[in-house]
Image (cartoon, coloured by chain):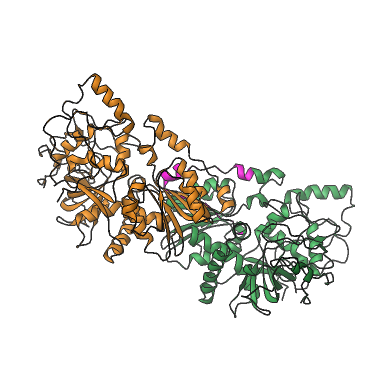
Chain colours: A green, B orange
Amino acid sequence: MCAPHKFDDALQSSGSTDIWSLEPERSSCRLLLAAQQLVELVTPFFYFTTSDFTVYVIDVGGRKFSAQNARVNEANCMQTPCENDVVFDGLNFQDLMVRQGTIDSPPKTPFILGFECAGDVEQVGENVKNLKIGDRVAALSEYKAWAELVLVPAKYVFAIPSDMKYEDAAAIIMNYIVAYILLFELGNLTAGKSVLFHSAGGGVGHALVQLSQTVPDVKIFGVASKSKHEALQDKGITHLLERGSDYVSEVRKIAPEGIDIVLDCLCGEECNRGYSLLKPMGKYVLYGSANVVTGETKSIFSAAKSWWQVDKVSPSKLFDENKSIAGFNLRHLLFQQNQVEYVSGILDKVFDLWTKKKITPVIDSKWALEDVSEAMQKMHDRKNIGKLILDPSAEPKPKPATPLKSKGKSIDKEDKEKDKKKEEESGSNSAGATNGSHSPQGGTQAS
Amino acid sequence: MCAPHKFDDALQSSGSTDIWSLEPERSSCRLLLAAQQLVELVTPFFYFTTSDFTVYVIDVGGRKFSAQNARVNEANCMQTPCENDVVFDGLNFQDLMVRQGTIDSPPKTPFILGFECAGDVEQVGENVKNLKIGDRVAALSEYKAWAELVLVPAKYVFAIPSDMKYEDAAAIIMNYIVAYILLFELGNLTAGKSVLFHSAGGGVGHALVQLSQTVPDVKIFGVASKSKHEALQDKGITHLLERGSDYVSEVRKIAPEGIDIVLDCLCGEECNRGYSLLKPMGKYVLYGSANVVTGETKSIFSAAKSWWQVDKVSPSKLFDENKSIAGFNLRHLLFQQNQVEYVSGILDKVFDLWTKKKITPVIDSKWALEDVSEAMQKMHDRKNIGKLILDPSAEPKPKPATPLKSKGKSIDKEDKEKDKKKEEESGSNSAGATNGSHSPQGGTQAS
């Protein structure tokens, strides 16, 4: 949907063959609107600013590259060897962390969010051999994926099966890579074992359930918000546990011998709980820290507190107890540790399972880029069953013609009351705010 | 070779069906001599005493059982449901730790050492269904295996392939179970990966090399004493490194990207070194603490120091670095954590590999029970290439008719000078000492 762009010859001739620059010839596009929408979500560490949007061209490895800066309203498409005309983007919990400032090594603001997308290849760099224009692909991008045109180094771009829908590719790529590595590369899941995980109703949760079911006799302990239990009833989770309840006691009753594999995306106190539930030869894997986003307090200290609550473990304790602990961080693996070849091998296995109809991504809802704030709110509130997808071609939801009574609703429910009070007192900040409502049913209005 | 014994009806009728007691009708046998021999090895925490040998009947799970105490010279055979007429025993580094008092939860002294043996079933308990008299078996015993007759709970006794020699069974059972679990259950070894381990010339070392070779393109980094390098040249170790050298720098030169699996049986500073060598997604496994036995200092502090040197690891660090740490302790797994069914499944796989001729145990030498001190000394001095086997039917080496000039040589080389000095001063302690020499060539005199 974006017009093709010529590569910047000047940059090419400067000696870099890795990074390509686009001529800033695009007119303002939908992403700018999405960014404005995001600004409405007030959090202490929000990266977007309301004025002078600028896009920095940054080497994906983290090293800054001296390419040009371009105003977002001139060219909001990121750039590196392989250019992707994006059809669908995936939304991850990680994006919430970025928005709240709780992710490590964030890029300089302002920048475009998003770590995955799927679509057609629109242009390829000179040295790219494995891809050609028109290829149907999915990509893992270090930020910048929530756009209509995304530039990603060719190594992070993967051909998808010919009969896979783009939205399925966007829903599969990150979630199933993560789930596969957790279960098979770190958890060593084999027949008869038990596995426990949180956020069982989310995108990774569904992937974990389906991949676990490819192994005989696996007992799945899934923790999810009570409101999701009905929808998850028939998904194959052996023991559905309630988020916020004393699930540890319940697990101990059901499986007094302990659990083989505990997967923890919450961190904080869950680390110690998760470790304590392991049976001998059990494996605990920390793969996220969602608690820093949805924890009870929303302050600069909540992230730090979440880590403080994690006990350090001595290898000698593991030796005594026959236990393992592992950490998994796909972003670091891809963009700091250069293990894309390994990840690509995992994706091959995932696509193979999809081709054999062993896995089917579950999509909660699709959203226009303009409605990203609402989509994020839904994820934050843990109301999604499956994956949230952004569709850059989708029309945004109709917005009310008049300004809302309240400024775009804060992501902090606790802050709602305060906001209301403030507004009642001043009533000045709501000017220009668009629809900030977060209907629980979400949007499936996209094509 | 031991006469069959009747079970103690009184004990049986007392309500226990798990523990059986033997009538103390055996005359003193070779094990007593072996024990006396051991006493000559002077170390600070030696468990044997020279007088009033008593054998306690203890439930293998660790719970004390109120059976009778019997003088060793009356009945030195331990007891529980399945009774093994022992043909061969294995000697492990763990036995050195027991002898030096650096193992956790040691039994009350005096007791009989040894964790593994192989032979025929001589008698079975009432409730034993899976074994019958005459079965060819190997057993994992919590201590007490270095004897001519061993009583082991039936669950720790495993049938061996019909064409497997007893000495091979004794050499395989513990070493290959450990190596298999390290590589495949914890290390997740797959094609193309690299693995590093210490003590490459020992029993577990040979098992690790052979099992690694069952996977294509595995790069094996083996650390061994320089003196063993020639013997290990053709064993399939990709990079043979020298114990005591700066092997870490050498590994970094050969594999700057790091190692996939680091197996550490030394502990102490090696923990931190091993962890530092891991590549992303790499796994470090601690499975022993041999450094507490052969460390430079031989004091009560050496064991503690070895643990102090180990850095604690936070799960969040593992999360950042995409690394895993695991501990493995077969003894705890079997006798404290009741995971014998799991271990039995591993042994099935090991025996299957043996049947397919994928693995062949390497036996360094066989020893009479009376020569156990010399065998232990050889292991302590790291002079063995492969497994040391004790053969209760073997004739001991001829001993000099006259008392030696020195008291049985201390296991501490550093102490030799002191000992010599002391002897020169007093000359009184050597009375009754038998041959304590530790010839480097070891003994292959057994049948």
Q: Position of residue B49 (x, y in %)?
A: 23, 29
Q: Is residue B290 left or right of residue B411?
A: right
Between A96 and B68, the residue placed more toward the observer is: A96
From the viewer's perspective, is residue A392 above or below residue B108?
below
Can residue B62 be seen?
no
Q: Quadrant of the N terminus of chain A?
A: bottom right
Between B73 and B387, the residue placed more toward the observer is: B387
What is the quadrant of residue A189 in the picture?
Answer: bottom left
Could you tell me how many numbered marks the image carries?
0
From the viewer's perspective, is residue B324 above or below residue B79?
below
Q: Position of residue A345 (x, y in %)?
A: 53, 68
| Residue shown at the point (78%, 75%) measured from the top left | A6
Can residue A275 be seen?
yes
Q: Quadrant of the C terminus of chain A?
A: bottom right
Between A228 and B32, the residue placed more toward the observer is: B32
Q: Is residue B307 left or right of residue A53?
A: left
Q: Position of residue B190 (x, y in %)?
A: 44, 63
Q: Is residue B9 left or right of residue A165?
A: left
Q: Position of residue B279 (x, y in %)?
A: 53, 55
Between A121 and A175, the residue placed more toward the observer is: A121
| Residue shown at the point (29%, 34%) measured from the top left | B411
Q: Is residue B139 left or right of residue A136?
A: left
| Residue shown at the point (18%, 35%) measured from the top left | B435
| Magenta segment includes A4 | no
Q: What segment carries the magenta color?
A: A305-330
| Magenta segment includes A318 | yes
Q: Residue furthest top?
A: B425
| Residue shown at the point (52%, 48%) measured from the top left | B276
